[in-house]
Amino acid sequence: MTKDLNEISDKLKAVLQKHKTVFKVTSEKPENYQVSGTIPTMQGKQKVDGIYFASVVPKPKDIRFYFFPLYTHKEQIDPLLSDDTRKLLKGKTCFHVKHLTPEIEANLQQLTDKAVQLYQQDNWLIKE
C-alpha cells in the first residue's frame, strides 16, 4: 500500500494511459491530467470533439480520480466496484484516494477497461 500522493497520482495516470491509443489527453498539467475520447459526439445538449472520460487531480490531502463512466454507465460499472474502492467514492463519480493498495489499483484498472469497452460499443471511443 502506498500513501505517497505523487506515487498514487502516477499510478492513477498509468491506469488511464494503458488505453492511450483511444484517448486524447485534454489536459496534462500538474494540477489536472484529463482524458477524453476522439470521436465527435453529443455530451448533454452540445456537440464535443470527444466525450470526457476521466481526470486525475492532486489535492493537498488526496488524489481525486474523476471517473465519468460511473455517471454514463452506472448500471454496468457500479456492480464491479469492490468494497474498498467503493469506500473512496464521494458523490457520483469522484474517488478520493488517500492510499492505494494493489487491490484498489487493480479494481480501478478493471473499471477503466470495462468502461473503455462500453464507450467503444457506444461509438464514443475508437477501437484499439
Image (tube, grey):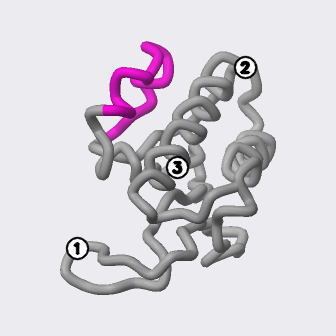
What is the CA distance from the residue labelled 1 to the residue labelled 3?
A: 23 Å
Q: Which residues are magenta?
A: 76-90
Q: Which amino acid type is shown beneath numbered disc 2?
A: Pro
Q: Nearer the viewer, mark 2 or mark 3?
A: 2
> In the drawing, what numbered circle is on residue 102?
2
Specify whether 99 is left or right of 11: left
- Amino acid on which disc 3 is placed: Arg
Q: Residues within 10 Å of mark 3 (few under 14, many from 20)?
A: many
**Lower position in the chain sequence, tag 2 or tag 1:** 1
Q: Is residue 103 above or below residue 94?
A: above
Separation of disc 2 and disc 1 at Cα?
Answer: 35 Å
The residue nearer to you, when weighing 48 against 90, is: 48
Secondary structure character of the magenta stretch overall? helix
Q: Is residue 79 left or right of residue 9?
A: left
In the rendered structure, which disc, 2 or 3, sits on the residue that comes first in sequence? 3
Residue labelled with disc 1: 44
Please name the residue that numbered disc 3 is placed on: 64
